[in-house]
Image: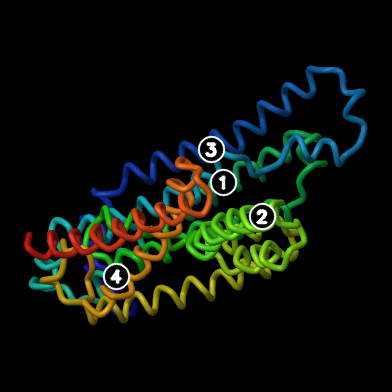
Amino acid sequence: MQSKKLPFNKNLLQKDWKLVQWIFYSFLGLMIIAVPYFIGQQASSFLAESQSQYNNIYRLRTIFRIENQVVLMAIGVIPVILATLLIGEEKRKKTLEIMIAGPYTRFEIFFNKIFLGVFIITVPIIVSGLILMGMRFFSPLLLSLYTGIDIVAWIISYSLIGVSVFSFSILIGILMGSSLGQFICSYIFIFFPVAFYGLFLVSYNKFYTLINGNHVPYDNAVNRAAEIFGQITPMFFFYKAIELAPEIQIFHSTLLLFISISIIVVSHVLFDLSKMEKNSELLTFESTEEFFRFGILICSILLGGAIIGGIIDRGISGMLIGYLVGGYAGYKVPKYLIQKNRAA
């Protein structure tokens, strides 16, 4: 039943597999269609057409890029859904309490969920990459487009992007008490630095234009700071590997591996500290309530100024009205949600 070296538990794996197996098969099918099948179709169409306009290898590679919008979206969405089902949904249903009260340790429960999640994310990417690798030997065109290093770097980088997003959402799931809270907050915090600065920038640009009568210069220091916030935004950092050369992709992926392991270790520590009776509440730890409420308040103020101030369009007075409405909502809504979930 259990390994003497690692805490694999057949019962736990089977239980979680029944919950998320549909994600595995859906992701596997999606990756096979989006990568080897799509590239094969592109290659067939290319060979059937006149090739005079495609007279250099660079042009060919821009057509037959391994990554596409479907794959990019999938590795940003599927890991969050997977983490939400493995952690948040179990909290909402309070099944974690039952498992912990039974013969399983917290480490066993956590380890098997992480193992299964990483398996479901990486195997479809590996399979689609290996199929593409095999297709090279039957197509001189594909052989000229992709080297073995290209495909291996793609497999490693995309697998670790998915694992990074998964581990980040696991951490949010440990902090939140329900599946809905985990899913929403995973995307809020994974884009938080640049999104928060974007809200601030809208207000800054609006006030600058109202006061000075012209738009903010593009090279303004406040505008340039957006690049810094973009660099420290988790999702942008995870996806940075896509822009790099294959050799550098592997180095960046090694960094992602270290970050993912660190996040998982922190998540496990917090999982050990969490109180199971807090499951199904909005937040797992009461100590995070003030930070949560303050963050919602500030973001709501800026969002209210941007949206309502733009609708009213009465200059500074319109912005102030937007700030007041956003601030009121930002104060009341999280307070209501925390109290409602706690009462439930």
**Mark earlier in primary sequence (2, 4):** 4
**Mark earlier in primary sequence (1, 4):** 1
**Mark earlier in primary sequence (4, 3):** 3
> Which residue is denoted by mark 2 in the rendering?
242
Q: Amino acid at mark 4?
A: Leu
- The residue lying at 30 percent from left, 68 percent from top is 293
- In the image, residue 128 sits, relative to residue 272, either above or below, namely above
Q: How far is the residue under mark 4 from the one under mark 3?
A: 35 Å
For the residues bearing labels 3 and 1, Cβ distance under 8 angstroms = no
Crowding around mark 3 (Cα neighbors within 10 Å: few <14, some 14 to 19, many 20+) is some
Q: How far is the residue under mark 2 from the one under mark 4?
A: 30 Å
Crowding around mark 2 (Cα neighbors within 10 Å: few <14, some 14 to 19, many 20+) is some
Taking the image as drawn, is residue 117 in sight? no
Q: Quadrant of residue 172?
A: bottom left
Q: Amino acid at mark 1?
A: Leu
Q: Which mark is residue 72?
A: 1
- In the image, residue 111 sits, relative to residue 214, either above or below, namely below
The secondary structure type at the circle numbered 1 is: helix
> Which residue is denoted by mark 4 in the rendering?
175
Mark closer to the observer (4, 3):
4
> Which residue is denoted by mark 3 in the rendering?
32
Crowding around mark 4 (Cα neighbors within 10 Å: few <14, some 14 to 19, many 20+) is many
